[in-house]
Image: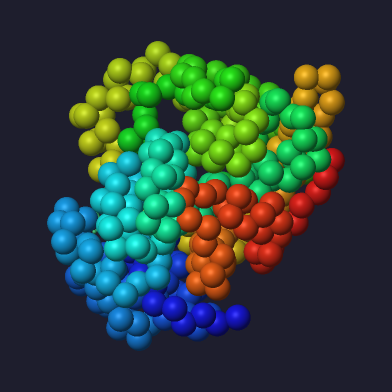
Amino acid sequence: MVMTGPWLLYGANGYTGELVARLAAAQGHRPILAGRRAGEVCALAEELRLERRLFALDDPRRIDDALGGMSLVLHCAGPFSRTSRPMADACLRTRTHYLDITGEVGVFEALAARDGEGRAARVMLLPGCGFDVVPSDCLAVHLKGRLPGARRLALAYAGFSRVSRGTATTAIEGLGRGGLVRRGGVLTPVPSAWKSRRIDFGDGPRRAITVPLGDLSSAWHSTGIPDIEIYFGAPPGLRALAVAARYLGPLLGSAAVRRFLVARVRAGAPGPSEQERRRGRAFVWGEVEDDAGRRAASRLALPEGYTFTERAALAVVEHVLSGQAPAGFQTPARAFGPDFVLGIEGVTRTDL
Ligand SMILES: NC(=O)c1ccc[n+]([C@@H]2O[C@H](COP(=O)([O-])OP(=O)(O)OC[C@H]3O[C@@H](n4cnc5c(N)ncnc54)[C@H](OP(=O)(O)O)[C@@H]3O)[C@@H](O)[C@H]2O)c1
């Protein structure tokens, strides 16, 4: 189904923004490409024969002007801890639906707190339209359906090929803050890599450690399950580093160390190559448990993370353009149901 509604893709010159722009154009969409870097945004817009709008996020009037006539914004410029607020403000003022691809807990929480504003303006606020959190959110709601009385939820990721510069930069922002879990419905600080467990993602058990990903917010809002832990199937070197971060917290959080790490990241490749994306696979596993000890577990097999993100973000755009845009704060599964993920090419779900 080809949609023609006017929509804006902000951060189109970033690694992920460009992937989405190319896929959108290939599928017959006509997004308006936007960003603050004239040369890169214009070159891409020209190549894809799309319109473009150039603006930074530090002048509210310019953002409002740029959103004029748009039905939605797909915001791909991160770290979202810095970019989400000005765009969401503008979306609420101009009555434009707000979608982003964040995986940052703080951003989900900030947008959830604006649910009332979104409803009043009849604007949808939907963060997390990428690899984190579309599959995990859908899996969480699916599991809740299998065990409605669930009180505990564990979700786990595995199979990253390589992360993009933007993902690495966003991760560096969070260094030194330690870990997080949800306990009794409340986000609760814990040490970095606080727990570890062996999880079978489909190719035999792997050791996974707790990480503070956006699902701690989205899964809570989608399921109401009060105790949530998110795991990441990490190789031994990364696990050791995560444990070491407990003791290096103040050092890792210092501005000088962050600047050094960001410079190293900026000197590297923008993200996985096309070949790496084509070859890569990713997995999300989930388990729920109720107070009687009953359990249910399910697993998703997915395309590589950035390939999944471009497909999922575009699928969300299509749903919103077709009128499925409930007002206020939403999660992917709350807005479109737990089977939304199964409509994305390359995804399969197994109940274990
Ligand atoms: N949840 C998920 O599954 C998922 C998947 C993919 C990406 N992401 C997130 O998406 C974000 C982008 O990732 P990426 O790989 O595309 O990164 P990238 O290649 O570094 O691109 C970042 C983009 O954001 C823009 N940007 C950054 N800070 C900005 C600011 N203050 N104002 C305006 N524009 C700003 C950049 O513009 P300039 O070139 O002008 O700096 C660029 O267009 C990251 O936060 C990443 O973690 C999440």
Residue at position x 37%, y 32% from top?
174
Residue at position x 77%, y 30% from top?
149
Residue 107 showing in the rendered view:
no
User: Quadrant of the rendered structure where residue 178 is?
Assistant: top left
Nearest the viewer among 4 and 68 is 68
- How far across and how far down the image is residue 340, in percent? 66, 59
Nearest the viewer among 274 and 107 is 107
Residue at position x 83%, y 45% from top?
351
Give the quarter of the figure containing the C terminus. Answer: top right
Give left or right: position of 42 versus 79: left
- How far across and how far down the image is residue 335, in percent? 58, 55
User: Quadrant of the rendered structure where residue 95 is?
Assistant: bottom left
- How far across and how far down the image is residue 108, in percent? 44, 41
Residue at position x 34%, y 82% from top?
50
In the depicted structure, whether residue 184 falls above or below residue 115: above
In the depicted structure, whether residue 151 falls above or below residue 303: above
Direction front: furthest residue: 120
Give left or right: position of 217 versus 138: left
Give the quarter of the figure containing the N terminus. Answer: bottom right
